Amino acid sequence: MGRKMELGEMKMPAVIMQPTFADNALSVLERRYLMKDVEGNVIETPAEMLWRVASSIAVADRLYDKDADIEGLALSFYEMMANRDFMPNSPTLMNAGRDLGQLSACFVLPVEDTMDSIFEAVKQTALIHKSGGGTGFSFSRIRPHNDVVHSTRGVSSGPLSFMSVFDCATETIKQGGTRRGANMAILRVDHPDIMDFIKVKSDLSVLNNFNISVAITDSFMEAVENDEEYELINPRNNEAVKKQNAVKVFRQIVKQAWYSGEPGIVFIDRMNADNPTPEVGMIESTNPCGEQPLLPHESCNLGSINLANMIIDGQVDYQKLGATVANCVHFLDNVVDVNRYPLPEIEEKTKQNRKIGLGVMGFADMLLRLSIPYSAPEALEVAEKVMRYIDTSAYQASVHLGEQRGAFPNFPRSIYGHKNPDVPVRNATRTTIAPTGTISIIAGCSSGVEPLFAVSYVRRVMDNDEFFEVNPVFEEIAKANGFYSPELLKKVSHSGSVQGIEEIPLKYRRLFETAHDISPRNHIDIQAAFQKSTNNAVSKTINFSNSATVDDVKEAFMLAYKLGCKGVTIYRDGCRENQVLNIGKTDKKKSVQADVLRPVKKDRPRRLNGSTYQMTTGCGPMYVTINEDSQQQFFELFNTVGKAGGCAASQCEAIGRLVSLAWRSGLPPEPIVKQLIGISCHKPAGFGQNKVVSCADAIAQAIRQHLERNNGCKDETLSEKTMFGACPECGGVIEHEGGCCVCHSCGYSECA
């Protein structure tokens, strides 16, 4: 399966340690990261991928020392990744050593109050998304709707209308089949259109390529605490246009977040208080998940240390952690040099400040190996101590590089240059806590600083077999203490939690807490603990049960502000009306209703409206007809296969009858897609334009196309609009973590 070496590429040593990845990690690597030929066949091993990344990043040392031992450095980078001690962000894994060469995950683009600036930003967004990055914007400089436009003697349509333009552009760009576009839209709380912005996602079918956050100022929070009014400022002339009650606005933010999980909030003054280069510019926006504040046209390269691997004999191995931090800072600083930036403006601004974002993953696993519950006070002590050590070590490593290579060019205009000009700091910022949904699957650890997603869950692979993924620490303990069994894993996987399962000793039920087992206060406490020693921000989701109240969310927002967080994102389980799957505790009221409301099969009316879809299968052309009733509800499905007769035709007829029965009994179409899509009986490449791998898969894809057409979506955009809560690629469970949505089964992430 090996590939030919590219021209000028450093040859991989003949004898090198081979990485060990779990089956789920290998599946994600093959699906998203390993190089493929034009027919979609994998032509790279995991070891070759890691060497491709390590060797291409190590080459940057020659820029500073023509005699540098880049082979030895590449080997150290390789072993750090092969041991799963560290993983860079996804674009680096995907693109390092390849023609694209774009290695950054985070970008912020300026949007000024002119048509030229707005549509230049749209163009730049398309180029960034095409290269695999995500973008953040502040729309706060755009004049409010109905404001005067002197050049046309008309009125402005306002920032929300232009956000829709960016959203459409993102929908159109397909990033080489590896990553979809993601955006962050931020509007200042003192913008005249703020109430419309807060409410924009009351309709869950709009702006699906955006996360939205309100930029909250310290003066606004003071007005909230004192129940006062504050001024709304027209950005066209910086004049106050009216006053608004702060409590009313804050209450609307809270209510909307309770309803849909958005908007999030960023404490913009707090971010600017930690801005290392205030003379260069002010921070207005962040990357899509909120953890990376950036100046306009800046980018940032992220990577995460696997804290689960920093435990030896039940103790944190600070010597190993410090050495890993130094190596990671070296790696990420080199990325700044070898990166191929999508725009010259971005290259210039990025190299002037050389920001990097070293974070962590596997924190929950670290606590488990220390026998500390996530909600225990000791967990906060570990979080603060470990992150303080990482931040201090990263600063020291950056100074060491600065002594060898020079400080970042804007150093004389930075807080470091003014405070201590004789200590050259290489990187304006060094630490960030990013969501690590996909790379943590590769590393085989928990995501970011989140609690466990689940102790055990079902993973359905493409041939529709089911496997139980289990937390490795739980598996070790369960086997060592004699209560491990396949039946137990199946029981745990029903909710993902061990709470209430009597077969598991109480002390282990207390230890193995999941995101839905702990309180919002515990979530915020951990976020605040990590924020104390993080240069940038901490991406984390504050989970609420479905029964949480608006006041519960309000208290969480206030607490996050008081504890020093730079932003907060909440998610109330099941709050999206179309969520069809979840992991965690089931709302009791809904369970009772489910028991009472029995499905009733509807009679077939004399006339139905339908559409027929032609699909290419291994058994010949298939024609799938989907009929709807007068309320446009899915009612029945028929299909015919080109080669009549035989098992294929009879099995397809059986599927059609069962699907029709399910729809006439009230089952929505999304679970049907989830169950049928990906069932395989042919080679992985599939047949036809849709890469159909079986007749069942063809039926599922036809249903999905029908859903997309009805919802105004384009190809492969079935996520939030019709399948929120179920992975649009494999049908697995979507979990909200780190301000993003991640599928732990296949590695799908809604955030770039």
Image (cartoon, rainbow, N blue to C red):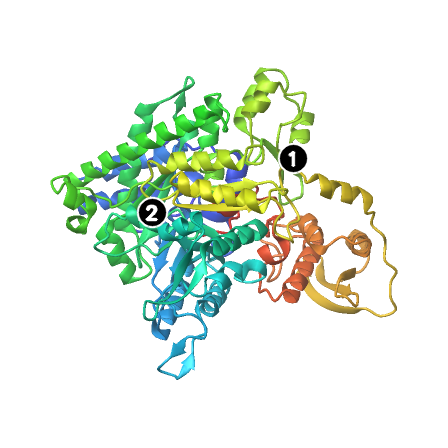
Q: Residues within 10 Å of mark 2 (few under 14, many from 20)?
A: some
Residue 351 lies, in percent from the top left, at: 24, 53
Residue lying farthest to the bottom in this orientation:
153
Closest to the observer, 127 or 374: 374
Can you tell which of label 1 and label 2 is closer to the viewer?
2
Q: CA distance from mark 1 to mark 2?
A: 38 Å
Position in image of residue 108 (x %, y %):
35, 57
**In the image, 70: left or right of 746?**
left
Residue 740 in sight: yes
Determine the secondary structure under disc 2. Answer: helix
Circle 1: residue type: Ser
Q: Nearer the viewer, residue 145 or 700?
A: 145
Report x, y in % for residue 430: 29, 41
Question: Where does label 2 land, which residue?
Answer: 270
Q: Which mark is residue 293?
A: none
Q: From what the image shows, is residue 179 above or below residue 477?
A: below
Task: Please give the label number shown on residue 495.
Answer: 1
The residue at the point 27 percent across, 42 percent down is 58
Residue under the point 53% across and 60% down: 199
The residue lying toward the viewer, choosing from 553 and 482, is 553
Mark 1 residue element: loop
Q: Earlier in the sequence, mark 1 or mark 2?
A: 2
**Residue 449 visible from this viewpoint:** no
State which quadrant residue 492 falls in.
top right
Q: Amino acid at mark 2?
A: Arg
The residue sitting at the left extreme is: 422
Q: Measured along the vertical axis of the image, is residue 413 above or below residue 243?
A: above
* Image label count: 2
